[in-house]
Image: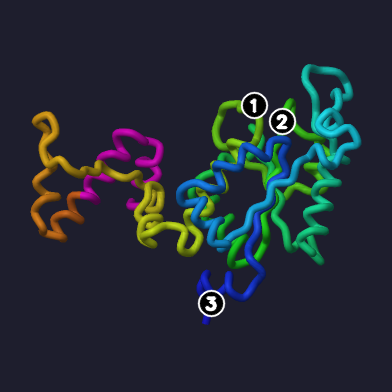
């Protein structure tokens, strides 16, 4: 019989996320607020940020270099990144890093991260017991040789450029952690989120019942659970077609 995710967590060392970054302070508020803060504060999952400047003889001034062949900007050094990754392996006591760790880099060339990727990453993290290492790039990026030798997956969060990988990494961690056991107050919340069934959520309402002459739909006030479910499902299809026609077309293919 397959073990539950909760049992998987109980029978292994605490799942851990490592972040290799030049700006560890970017993560202080992130890991202490809301759903993510609760998850890390109760030690269900651990996170540790390593400052890349500690692995260069010149601190932050030595983590990058000018690109060979010319060109603008600076490139993060492979040897500094490797020294930091070695520290992860040492601190975590990983006997087989290739099997024990999933090393992730965020860059424009990467696969655009989506809900399915969050599920797959959660499976690697919990069921397959691979701790996660996130590389936060800066400047023009990181030396290709480090990517070739040590990076398992490259993700992008969209077709735009950020000044650094910290925000992208936070987005991925947040999305992933919502699927971990007990992360949300209601375990059904994640299952009913947008994208879980190929559709986005429909409209939602709360008090007051009348807002500037606009009433809450009568179906939601009926008390008829079957009618409410039917209404919500129809609205999900309607809103997906209206706001995300790309998803709607894919949804139609699965129903044809």
Task: Count numbered badges in the picture.
Answer: 3
Residue 117 rendering spot, x and y as whole percentages: 55, 50
Determine the image quadrant of residue 15.
bottom right
Q: Nearer the viewer, residue 121 or 171?
A: 171
- For the point 35% across and 54% down, which residue is it? 192
Mark toward the start of the polypeptide (3 vs 2): 3
Residue bearing mark 3: 3
Residue bearing mark 2: 138
Residue 18 rendering spot, x and y as whole percentages: 69, 51
- For the point 59% across and 67% down, which residue is it? 127
Task: Tell me which segment is drawn in magenta.
Answer: 232-256
Badge 2: few (under 14), some or many (20 or more) residues near its Cα, within 10 Å? some
Q: Is residue 88 visible?
A: yes
Tags 2 and 1 touching, CB below 8 Å: yes
Q: Secondary structure at mark 2?
A: loop
Q: Nearer the viewer, residue 207 or 244?
A: 207
Q: Is residue 218 left or right of residue 111?
A: left
Q: Is residue 235 magenta?
A: yes
Mark toward the start of the polypeptide (2 vs 1): 2
Structural distance between the alpha carbons of marks 1 and 3 = 42 Å
- For the point 54% across and 75% down, which residue is it? 7
- Magenta span: predominant SS is helix
Q: Is residue 253 visible?
A: no
Badge 3: few (under 14), some or many (20 or more) residues near its Cα, within 10 Å? few
* Mark nearer the viewer, 3 or 2: 2
Residue 170 rendering spot, x and y as whole percentages: 57, 42
Q: Is residue 59 magenta?
A: no
Residue bearing mark 1: 163
- For the point 48% across and 64% down, which residue is it? 181
Q: Secondary structure at mark 3?
A: loop
């Amino acid at each position: 019989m397959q073990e539950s995710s909760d049992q998987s967590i109980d029978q292994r060392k605490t799942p851990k996320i490592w972040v290799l970054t030049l700006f560890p302070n970017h993560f202080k508020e992130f890991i202490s607020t809301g759903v993510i803060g609760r998850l890390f504060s109760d030690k269900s999952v651990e996170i540790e940020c390593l400052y890349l400047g500690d692995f260069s003889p010149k601190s932050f001034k030595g983590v990058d270099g000018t690109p060979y062949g010319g060109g603008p900007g600076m490139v993060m050094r492979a040897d500094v990144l490797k020294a930091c990754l070695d520290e992860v392996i040492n601190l975590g006591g990983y006997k087989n890093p290739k099997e024990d760790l999933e090393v992730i880099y965020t860059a424009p060339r990467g696969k655009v991260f989506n809900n399915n990727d969050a599920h797959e990453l959660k499976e690697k993290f919990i069921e397959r017991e691979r701790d996660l290492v996130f590389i936060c790039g800066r400047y023009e990026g990181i030396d290709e040789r480090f990517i070739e030798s040590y990076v398992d997956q490259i993700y992008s969060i969209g077709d735009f450029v950020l000044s650094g990988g910290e925000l992208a990494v936070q987005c991925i961690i947040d999305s992933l952690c919502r699927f971990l056991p007990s992360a949300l107050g209601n375990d059904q919340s994640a299952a009913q989120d947008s994208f879980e069934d190929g559709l986005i959520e429909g409209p939602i309402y709360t008090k007051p019942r009348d807002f500037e002459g606009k009433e809450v739909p009568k179906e939601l006030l009926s008390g008829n659970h079957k009618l409410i479910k039917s209404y919500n499902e129809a609205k999900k299809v309607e809103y997906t077609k209206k706001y995300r026609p790309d998803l709607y077309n894919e949804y139609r293919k699965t129903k044809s």
